[in-house]
Image (spheres, grey):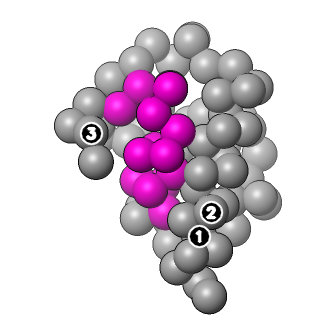
Amino acid sequence: MAAELRWDDAEELGIALADKFPEQDPLEVRFTDLHRYVTELPTFVDDPKLSNEGKLEAIQMAWHEEYMDRTR
């Protein structure tokens, strides 16, 4: 995992979120909450204003993949 995470690090962010919220189904998370979860990660260093729907969706899908891998 990267030491410092940015919006474009969807895969690494998905893993970090799966670590922090192992029981949470990512598809049930609203983008407003996802944005907050990402910006509250201790290794996240990017500007919170630089997110957009596409970046949040990529993070959510990466998190979902990790969630599915861990719950199968």
**Quadrant assignment for the C terminus:** bottom right
Q: From this view, report whether residue 38 is shown above or below residue 28.
A: above
Residue situated in front as seen by the camera: 5 or 33: 5
Residue 69: image location, x then y, percent: 56, 76
Mark 3 lies on residue = 2
- The amino acid beneath tag 2 is Glu
Residue situated in front as seen by the camera: 13 or 31: 13
Pointer 2 and pointer 1: residues touching (CB < 8 Å)? yes
Mark 1 lies on residue = 67
The span shown in magenta is 5-18
Per the picture, the main secondary structure of the magenta-coloured stretch is: helix
Mark 2 lies on residue = 65
**N-term mark: 2 or 3:** 3
Say left or right for 55 vs 42: right
- Can residue 9 be seen in this snapshot? yes
Q: Which residue shows up at 68% across the image and 50% down it? A: 61
Quadrant hosting residue 5 = top left
**N-term mark: 3 or 1:** 3
- The amino acid beneath tag 3 is Ala
